């Protein structure tokens, strides 16, 4: 009897959002979007206050305008991110792993000069059998600097890769007026931000943890959140937010465009700088290898070798 095919995309038993790479990706992939969420909510409520109005302008501009962002997360991550509508591109190092990533049309494309390190970053190798690990180690070197593709829409939302869908869908929801209004109502009952204008262009935003926790619990009950099928339907999306107990300082231009964002907590500092000039075109790779085909070939080889024995 053949062994059950191992599952290699589910990661550790603990949920994807508690893994280190997932927490890092929250800063890298949706750091801008998270600020957009909280800024949009509080600014819409306190529209007449000059500081909040400036930040709302910056948020709306960032959501609607193509941009290039440089993301520095301690000594682990150093990425250049390009955002153009619903297309995203990332180049640099992520969790000390060299990587290029493109997200477009529900697909994720990735390549690395160190595919073994890329595999270890996003998948938990300890969950694979020794035979599977050996086969993967023989295949991975051949993927050096080659694009692999993953269909995000058919990947389980509870898996490591599928979990990327949720923050991206939240960012898209913020562009819909009805969705933003629901979030405003939830925030109005649980205001967790303190906004201070430091000088003419700098603003400090601090998160009050108790209020944030209350907001979190109510958020997952809202219709807009429940409609996001890619998100966990329980109170866990942002409970491990790295900014709890810390603060964010935003620097804006005179016409209220984001120039930089520095997020500081007890354990980490992340900085994002923004450029809304010409954004290099995001090109969807045409020569990628589907990860399903790779997994299928590995399993087929595993079964074949078992049958021979």
Image (cartoon, rainbow, N blue to C red):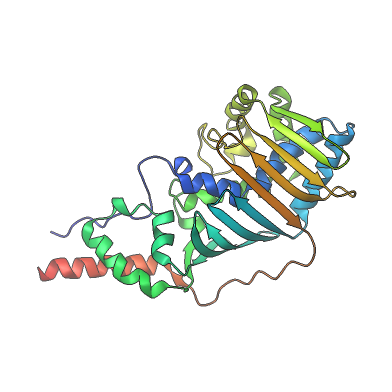
**From the viewer's perspective, is 253 left or right of 22?**
right
Residue at figure coordinates x 48%, y 67% from the top left:
112
Total labels drawn: 0
Residue 307 spot, x, y in % from top left:
13, 68
Q: Is residue 175 visible?
A: no
Q: Is residue 26 visible?
A: yes
Within the image, what quadrant is residue 203 found in?
A: top right
Residue at figure coordinates x 46%, y 40% from the top left:
18
Q: Is residue 205 above or below residue 94?
A: above
Residue at figure coordinates x 53%, y 52% from the top left:
76
Residue placed furthest toward the left: 309
Residue 92 spot, x, y in % from top left:
57, 63
Q: Nearer the viewer, residue 78 or 307?
A: 78
Residue at figure coordinates x 54%, y 60% from the top left:
93
**From the viewer's perspective, is 233 left or right of 125?**
right
Question: Which quadrant of the rendered structure holds the N terminus?
Answer: bottom left
Q: Is residue 286 above or below residue 107?
A: below
Question: Which quadrant of the rendered structure holds the C terminus?
Answer: bottom left
Residue 122 spot, x, y in % from top left:
43, 55
Residue placed furthest toward the bottom: 287
Within the image, what quadrant is residue 202 found in?
A: top right
Within the image, what quadrant is residue 91 found in?
A: bottom right
Q: Is residue 48 above or below residue 153?
A: above
Q: Nearer the viewer, residue 203 or 294?
A: 203
Q: Is residue 94 above or below residue 178?
A: below
Residue 245 spot, x, y in % from top left:
61, 29
């Amino acid at each position: 009897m053949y062994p059950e095919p191992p599952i290699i995309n589910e990661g550790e038993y603990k949920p994807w959002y508690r893994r280190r790479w997932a927490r890092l990706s929250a800063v890298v992939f949706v750091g801008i979007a998270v600020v957009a969420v909280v800024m949009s909510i509080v600014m819409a409520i306190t529209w007449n206050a000059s500081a909040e109005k400036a930040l709302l302008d910056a948020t709306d501009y960032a959501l609607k305008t193509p941009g290039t962002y440089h993301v520095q997360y301690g000594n682990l991550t150093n990425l250049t991110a390009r955002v153009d509508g619903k297309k995203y591109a990332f180049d640099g190092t992520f969790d000390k792993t060299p990587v290029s990533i493109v997200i477009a049309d529900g697909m994720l494309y990735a390549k690395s000069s160190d595919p073994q390190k890329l595999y270890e970053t996003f998948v938990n190798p300890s969950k694979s059998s020794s035979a599977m690990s050996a086969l993967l180690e023989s295949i991975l070197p051949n993927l050096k600097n080659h694009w692999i593709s993953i269909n995000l829409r058919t990947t389980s939302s509870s898996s490591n890769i599928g979990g990327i869908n949720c923050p991206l869908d939240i960012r898209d929801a913020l562009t819909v007026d009805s969705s933003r209004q629901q979030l405003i109502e939830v925030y109005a009952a649980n205001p967790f931000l303190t906004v201070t204008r430091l000088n003419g262009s700098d603003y400090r935003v601090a998160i009050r943890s108790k209020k944030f926790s209350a907001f979190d619990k109510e958020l997952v009950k809202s219709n807009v959140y429940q409609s996001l099928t890619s998100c966990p339907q329980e109170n866990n999306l942002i409970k491990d937010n790295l900014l709890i107990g810390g603060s964010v300082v935003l620097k804006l231009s005179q016409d209220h465009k984001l120039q930089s964002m520095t997020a500081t907590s007890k354990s980490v500092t992340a900085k994002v700088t923004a450029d809304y000039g010409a954004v290099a075109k995001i090109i969807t790779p045409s020569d990628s290898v589907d990860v399903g085909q790779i997994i299928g070939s590995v399993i087929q080889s595993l079964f074949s070798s078992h049958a021979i024995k």
